[in-house]
Image (cartoon, grey):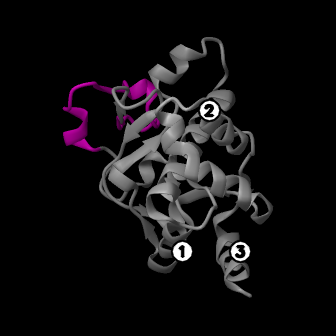
């Protein structure tokens, strides 16, 4: 199962430096039963795009909460990349948590805890993800920083029903993240750090 982990630019830098990434709150986004139920007939690729979209919105919330650089970051990993087994057993026992059956999980029979009580595509995984197991990294280009910054400032108001703020956030959501191989990230971060 492909899992999309929201992050920020400082978190990405730390992951490259330390060789591992620990998802905030153990939360990620994936193709869950809840997400698939919202889009009956959609293929896996379309559903994965929606899960990544949700992860990008979560990244925006992390940017807003921490005052990070206006660059949404999403790491794509497979469930078997978690060092401690990939499953948050305690989270699976919380109210609203469902388990994916082995046939619907990562193919190795290891379930992932779905958290439909939080949102349609939320899953929980336990432990850190090794950097060398990251499949791809997705992030914003520098030319969209003003849009992302404005959306970060508006996201809380949008969540509370402010329609003008929702339009601002929607402008950011309309921007697709760029795809990078993990091997490209060190070079990209060096470019971002240069004056």
From the image, tell me which residue sits under label 2.
Answer: 50
How far apart in space, not on screen, are marks 3 and 1 (Cα)?
10 Å
Please state the horizontal and vertical placement of residue 191, each as a whole percent of the image.
73, 80
For the question of whether residue 1 can be seen, the reply is no
Instruction: Indicate whether residue 91 is drawn in magenta.
Output: yes
Q: Residues within 10 Å of mark 2 (few under 14, many from 20)?
A: some
Q: Secondary structure at mark 2?
A: helix
Instruction: Indicate whether residue 44 is drawn in magenta.
Output: no
Q: Residue at x 20, y 32 (%)?
A: 94
Query: Looking at this rendering, what residue extends furthest in the bottom direction?
Result: 195
Q: Is residue 46 left or right of residue 76?
A: right
Sequence-first disc among 2 and 1: 1
Residue 162's quadrant in the figure?
A: top right
Question: Which of the pair 133/138 is nearer the observer?
Answer: 138
- Which disc number belongs to residue 13? 1
Q: Residue at x 68, y 82 (%)?
A: 190
Q: Which residues are magenta?
A: 88-112
Please state the horizontal and vertical placement of residue 57, each as a whole percent of the image.
56, 43
Q: Residues within 10 Å of mark 1 (few under 14, many from 20)?
A: some
Question: Which of the pair 99/105 is nearer the observer?
Answer: 99
Residue 100's quadrant in the figure?
A: top left
Q: Residue at x 38, y 61 (%)?
A: 22
Q: Is residue 150 left or right of residue 159?
A: right
From the image, tell me which residue sits under label 3.
Answer: 188
Q: Is residue 124 left or right of residue 29?
A: left
Question: Which of the pair 74/154 is nearer the observer?
Answer: 154
* Residue 195 position (above or below residue 123): below
Q: Secondary structure at mark 3?
A: helix
Q: Secondary structure at mark 1?
A: helix
């Amino acid at each position: 199962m492909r899992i999309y982990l929201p992050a920020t630019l400082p978190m990405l830098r730390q992951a490259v430096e330390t060789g591992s990434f620990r998802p905030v709150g153990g939360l990620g986004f994936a193709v869950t039963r809840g997400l698939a139920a919202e889009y009956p007939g959609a293929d896996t690729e379309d559903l994965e795009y929606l899960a990544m979209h949700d992860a990008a919105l979560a990244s925006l919330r992390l940017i807003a909460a921490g005052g990070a650089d206006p660059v949404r970051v999403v790491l794509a990993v497979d469930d078997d990349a978690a060092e401690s087994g990939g499953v948050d057993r305690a989270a699976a026992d919380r109210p609203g948590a469902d388990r994916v059956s082995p046939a619907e999980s990562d193919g190795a029979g290891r379930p992932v805890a779905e958290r439909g009580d939080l949102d349609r595509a939320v899953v929980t995984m336990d432990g850190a993800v090794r950097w060398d197991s990251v499949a791809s990294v997705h992030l914003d280009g520098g030319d969209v920083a003003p849009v992302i910054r404005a959306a970060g400032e508006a996201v809380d108001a949008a969540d509370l029903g402010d329609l003008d703020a929702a339009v601002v956030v929607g402008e950011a959501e309309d921007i697709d993240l760029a795809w990078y191989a993990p091997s490209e990230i060190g070079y990209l971060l060096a470019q971002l750090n240069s004056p």
